[in-house]
Amino acid sequence: MNKGMMIMLLVTVFALVIGGMWNKLSFVKDTIHGLLDPTAGVLLNWNVNIGMLIIAGAIVLITTLIQKYTTDQNLLREIKKKQKLLQGEMKKYKDHPEKLLEMQKKQLEFIPKTMDITMRPLLYTIVPIVLFFRWFSDYFALYPEIKIFGYLGWIWAYLIFAIIFSIIFRKIFNVA
């Protein structure tokens, strides 16, 4: 395991520990509630549907911008272009198992490079996102009857909105 992956693993474990210890770490919980209750909480209290759209959009916008500016976009595009060419070549040799195996090995060489590049933004975003999800969990536990647009639970609403906003923002900001 290389140094970058080790750091990523440690940050992920740290985020999960914070999320898991949410109720035991009152200073973290109180601080996050102090920040998000008067901002995101006010939006959700005003209109839960529009509030969730705005919050999901803001989170995805921030994470998209972090992804764009903390990764080498040109290198990532170059790797993707090479992968696409290799996939085209692999289709030509689908009847030649030995040549196909050789090309699959080449394709596997791209995985660590791509992982190193694409995981870097996660270092900056995983802890805040875990804290936001814990806050969402607390907020909606107080109002279990609330459904986003009449039938969606908060997590499903967030995931659907995040996917939609991610597609839009990745196109707008030309993120590889």
Image (tube, grey):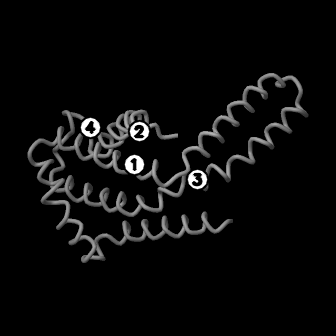
Q: Earlier in the sequence, mark 1 or mark 4?
A: 1
> Tag 3: residue type?
Ile
Q: Residues within 10 Å of mark 4 (few under 14, many from 20)?
A: some
User: Label 4 amino acid?
Assistant: Leu
What is the distance, in whole Å, between disc 2 and disc 1 at their CAs? 8 Å
Residue 152's mark? 4
Residue at 79% in and 39% down: 104
Is residue 70 rendered to the left or right of residue 97?
Answer: left
Residue 171 placement: quadrant = top left
| Numbered disc in front, either 2 or 4 | 2
Mark 2 and mark 3: Cα distance apart in space: 18 Å
- Mark 3 lies on residue: 117
Q: Position of residue 124 (x, y in %)?
A: 43, 61
The residue under the point 28% across, 73% down is 28
Residue 113 placement (x, y as % from top left): 66, 52
Q: CA distance from mark 4 to mark 3?
A: 34 Å
Image coordinates for residue 172, horizontal then vertical, percent: 39, 34
The Cα atoms of the two marked residues, 2 and 4, are separated by 29 Å
Which residue is identified by label 2? 173
Contact flag, marks 2 and 1 (Cβ < 8 Å)? yes
Left or right: 5 as drawn, with respect to 144: right
Three-letter residue code for mark 2: Phe
Q: Quadrant of residue 165?
A: top left
**Which circle's residue, 2 or 3, is located before the other in the chain?**
3
Circles 2 and 3: CB atoms closer than 8 Å: no
Indicate the quadrant where residue 164 lies.
top left
Q: Marks 3 and 4: in contact by CB < 8 Å?
A: no
Residue holding disc 1: 65
Q: Earlier in the sequence, mark 3 or mark 1?
A: 1
The numbered mark, 2 or 4, whose residue comes first in the sequence reads 4
Mark 2 vs mark 3: give the one in front: 2
